[in-house]
């Protein structure tokens, strides 16, 4: 340091000298950089050290270190507060030293065995040879601990669907007009007529609308508008899901699913806000002993869960009927339609059962499943299919056939095949689209003709979607269901006579609880869940895993992963997700949901606009909602600031202009834009939802506006005031409550006096202004009289013609 050195590099095994150096320098400047750090990977430690030297002005040969690359200029101005570096997304894996829940229980069990002093018990617990030296046992202990922690983590990701009995509702009336939308043509089971009689018996005026096959939304909207001309509809009951045949132009798409989506859209086009209830039968298995007989109809349940999220104000719910709608079942149906607090129910002989999400216990498999023959993996060249294929090779699968539409041309397919072959697994990569029955049959014939017999199928093929329900087309719906549902149906049909040990379907949480902008995707995955239940009921092997997002693969890119994490869905570490899959297949489960969910973040926005009985019974959800409700009750009082000082003395138009600018700036921050100027698309009259605002970002914008304004604002702010202009008017009205101090009022009067004194109006204008001022003065001097005059005016506005004539006759006499 005395020679002018200010940067010291410690080349050694740790940072001992770097820790002592600053004390030796005293007040002189200097930075100490250790190249290696205990407990840190060497490559990471060296790169971090060189990065620290680089920012201190020490040259580093980055080309030699990192290889060829493209040089990118950094921003020259350091205080723009604009995000530059990619945001790192933490995969669904906590630090190794975190232990809670089952992991803590496992460690407690371990230390109890240690304290017992029984070497053999310890050896049995961690599965090692008790005669081996202790030095050899330590790695086994570390491995055991890591396995237990991973098992605990994946155990926290597991959920299942259960069905809870609903207290039998009292007999309910259904007044008003109810629209019953049924497929056109005969009513062979008499279901339409029975629903019509049941509604009529409880006071409703049912109107049956027959929807022809292939009807477009405009034609259906016209039918709905015509049917509701005489009286506004009180409710809509759809029987369209019972039409299971293929759509005219899309043989892989059920007509009932297409019509249900079209009906949902047409109701919006016709401005009918009555709740839509969709009926099915055999689409769900509601508890032990109940069979799922109609997996095709299960797709409507997936679509309906998305409709509940995107159109909560005009969605009723989903009702699965028993095979025969007798009088008792009809009474229960009407009780649900009248409102029992549930929106996903099954009506059975024992009563009404409501769909619930529950924690799934950690399975304990008796044996580890090892595929004895060939395994077909559809979507095998994709990210998830590749992870599954590597796991199969690790399990000793003698042969894996990777099928996808791209086949060998898919990026990374050759490297994946080489890696599997290096592990000793015979590998084929085949171009085939299982959504086409002919190609699916040819693929299976080829797979079974050569090599070991086919013993397992893993269906991971699929397409992503990012389209609102209102904007989805039948063609897009057909494409979504073909990739997932049609492919699964073909594989199911064509392998029924094969001795399969596992039939695995990769589903999605979009089918479990719904996902905005994914109506077709949710419908297709709901079919997979239903198909697994259906196959098991018929004695065939089947497993459906409804996955949450995976880290670094599948349909979740870096930006999408960051968005999901904000919403409480942490992308899962692929290695841990595969471990969860191993547990599911080893234990032979039928249907399970695997997702890393932070319910504190996820639940409040998910239930913001519509309660969700499905998830609200989970303890974590109850706690999250209680905390959110407490925060809502307390409000965001901020530091007492208001916008009053900024708005004081400005005309209303200028006040609203400033408020619109404020709203644009805060909206830009919420959506991740660098500045309000980047929000040029957000015109004052353009809806927030058109720019991608949802329940989560709505809450974030509310919070930011609450802080800058000091006002208590509702969580549904942007849904109640959907454009910046509406919201600005609302904020201005709220600020006016803070501006009625004597000094502020006097200042406004002074301003008005100044304006009038400088004006040179003509006589007519002067009379007009004088009249307005006299009227204002009368109202100000006699507020009670003003209220009375307003009350009279309101009564006159609300009165009928007969009431007006009666008033004239009684009060003024005949004219």
Image (cartoon, grey):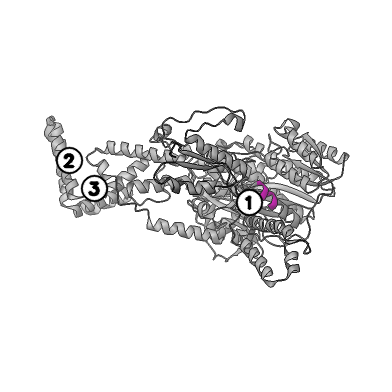
Sequence-earlier tag: 1 or 2: 1
Q: Nearer the viewer, residue 563 or 801?
A: 563
Residue 611, position as x, y percentages in the image: 51, 55
The extreme bottom residue here reads 116
Sequence-earlier tag: 3 or 2: 3
Residue 371, position as x, y percentages in the image: 81, 49
- From this view, report whether residue 534 is shown above or below residue 483: below
Residue marked by disc 2: 772
Q: From which residue to which does the magenta span run?
A: 574-579
Q: CA distance from mark 3 to mark 2?
A: 23 Å
Classify mark 2: helix, strand or loop. Answer: helix
Residue marked by disc 3: 739
Tell me: 421 left or right of 472. right
Residue 547, position as x, y percentages in the image: 65, 48
Of the two numbered discs 3 and 2 in the rendering, the one whose residue sits closer to the viewer = 3
At x 72%, y 45%, the residue is 388
Q: CA distance from mark 1 to mark 2?
A: 62 Å
Tell me: 802 left or right of 398. left
Classify mark 3: helix, strand or loop. Answer: loop
Residue marked by disc 1: 192
- How many residues crowd around disc 3 within 10 Å: few (fewer than 14), some, or many (20 or more)? some
Residue 681, position as x, y percentages in the image: 43, 32
Q: Nearer the viewer, residue 278 or 666?
A: 666
Residue 207 seen in render: no
Asked if the residues shown at circle 1 and circle 3 are in contact, with their CB atoms under 8 angstroms apart, the answer is: no
- Residue 282 sits in quarter: bottom right
- From this view, report whether residue 412 is shown above or below residue 147: above
- Residue 193 included in the magenta stretch of the image: no
């Amino acid at each position: 340091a005395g020679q002018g050195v200010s940067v010291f590099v410690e080349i050694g095994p740790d940072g001992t000298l770097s820790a002592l150096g600053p004390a030796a320098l005293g007040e002189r400047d200097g930075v100490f950089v250790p190249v290696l750090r205990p407990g840190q990977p060497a490559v990471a430690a060296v790169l971090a050290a060189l990065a620290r030297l680089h920012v201190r002005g020490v040259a580093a040969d980055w080309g030699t270190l990192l290889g060829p690359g493209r040089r990118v200029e950094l921003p020259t101005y350091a205080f723009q507060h604009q995000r530059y570096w990619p945001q790192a997304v933490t995969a669904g894996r906590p630090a190794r030293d975190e232990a809670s829940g089952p992991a803590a229980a496992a460690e407690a069990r371990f230390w109890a065995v240690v304290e017992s002093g029984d070497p053999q018990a310890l050896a049995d617990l961690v599965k090692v040879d008790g005669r081996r030296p202790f030095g050899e046992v330590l790695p086994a202990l570390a491995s055991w601990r890591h396995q237990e922690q991973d098992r605990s983590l994946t155990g926290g990701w597991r959920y299942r669907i259960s069905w809870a009995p609903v207290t039998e509702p009292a007999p309910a009336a259904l007044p008003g007009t109810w629209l019953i939308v049924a497929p056109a043509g005969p009513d062979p089971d008499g279901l339409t007529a029975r629903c019509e009689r049941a509604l009529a018996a409880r006071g409703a005026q049912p109107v049956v609308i027959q929807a022809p096959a292939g009807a477009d939304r405009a034609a259906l909207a016209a039918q709905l508008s015509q049917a509701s001309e005489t009286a506004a509809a009180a409710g809509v009951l759809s029987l369209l899901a019972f039409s299971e045949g293929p759509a005219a132009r899309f043989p892989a798409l059920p007509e009932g699913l297409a019509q249900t989506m079209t009906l949902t859209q047409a109701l919006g086009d016709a401005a009918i806000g009555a709740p839509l209830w969709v009926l099915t039968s055999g689409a769900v298995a509601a508890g032990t002993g109940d069979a799922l007989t109609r997996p095709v109809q299960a797709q409507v349940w997936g679509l309906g869960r998305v409709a509940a999220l995107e159109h909560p104000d005009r969605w009723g719910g989903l009702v699965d009927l028993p095979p025969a709608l007798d009088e008792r079942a009809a009474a229960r149906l009407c009780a649900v339609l009248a409102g029992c607090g549930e929106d996903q129910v099954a009506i059975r002989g024992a009563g009404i059962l409501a769909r619930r999400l529950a924690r799934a216990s950690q399975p304990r498999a008796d044996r580890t499943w090892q595929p004895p023959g060939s395994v077909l993996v559809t979507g095998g060249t994709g990210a998830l299919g590749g992870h599954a294929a590597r796991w199969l090779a690790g399990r000793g699968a003698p042969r894996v056939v990777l099928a996808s539409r791209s086949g060998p041309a898919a990026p990374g397919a050759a490297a994946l095949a080489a890696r599997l072959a290096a592990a000793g697994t015979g590998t084929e990569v085949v171009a085939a689209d299982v959504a086409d029955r002919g190609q699916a049959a040819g693929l299976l014939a080829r797979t079974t003709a050569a090599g070991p017999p086919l013993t397992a199928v893993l269906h991971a093929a699929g397409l992503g979607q990012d389209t609102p329900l209102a904007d989805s087309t039948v063609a897009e719906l057909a494409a979504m269901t073909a990739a997932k549902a049609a492919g699964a149906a073909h594989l199911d049909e064509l392998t029924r006579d094969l001795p399969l040990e596992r039939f695995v379907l990769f589903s999605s949480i979009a089918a479990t609880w719904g996902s905005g902008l994914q109506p077709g995707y949710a419908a297709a995955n709901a079919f997979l869940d239903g198909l697994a239940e259906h196959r098991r009921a018929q004695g065939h092997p089947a497993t459906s895993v409804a996955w949450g997002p995976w880290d670094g693969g599948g349909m979740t890119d870096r930006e999408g992963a960051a968005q999901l994490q904000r919403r409480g869905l942490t992308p899962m570490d692929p290695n841990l997700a595969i471990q969860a899959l191993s547990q599911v297949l080893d234990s032979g489960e039928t249907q399970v949901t695997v997702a890393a969910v932070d319910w504190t973040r996820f639940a409040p926005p998910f239930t913001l606009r519509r309660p969700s009985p499905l998830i609200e019974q989970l303890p974590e959800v109850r706690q999250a909602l209680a905390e959110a409700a407490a925060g809502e009750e307390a409000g965001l009082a901020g530091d007492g600031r208001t916008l009053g000082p900024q708005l004081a003395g400005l005309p209303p138009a200028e006040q609203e202009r400033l408020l619109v600018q404020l709203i644009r700036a805060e909206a830009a921050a919420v959506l991740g834009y660098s500045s309000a100027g980047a929000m040029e698309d957000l015109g004052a009259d353009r809806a927030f939802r058109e720019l991608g605002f949802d329940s989560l970002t709505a809450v974030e914008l509310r919070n930011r506006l609450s802080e800058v304004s000091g006002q208590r604002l509702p969580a549904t702010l942007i849904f109640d005031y959907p454009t910046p202009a509406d919201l600005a008017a609302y904020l201005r009205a709220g600020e006016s409550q803070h501006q009625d101090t004597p000094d502020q009022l006097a200042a406004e009067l002074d301003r008005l006096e100044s304006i009038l004194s400088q004006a040179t109006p003509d006589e007519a204008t002067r009379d007009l202004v004088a009249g307005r001022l006299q009227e204002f003065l009368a109202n100000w001097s006699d507020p009670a009289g003003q209220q009375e005059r307003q009350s009279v005016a309101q009564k006159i506005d609300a009165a009928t013609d007969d009431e007006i004539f009666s008033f004239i006759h009684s009060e003024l006499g005949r004219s």
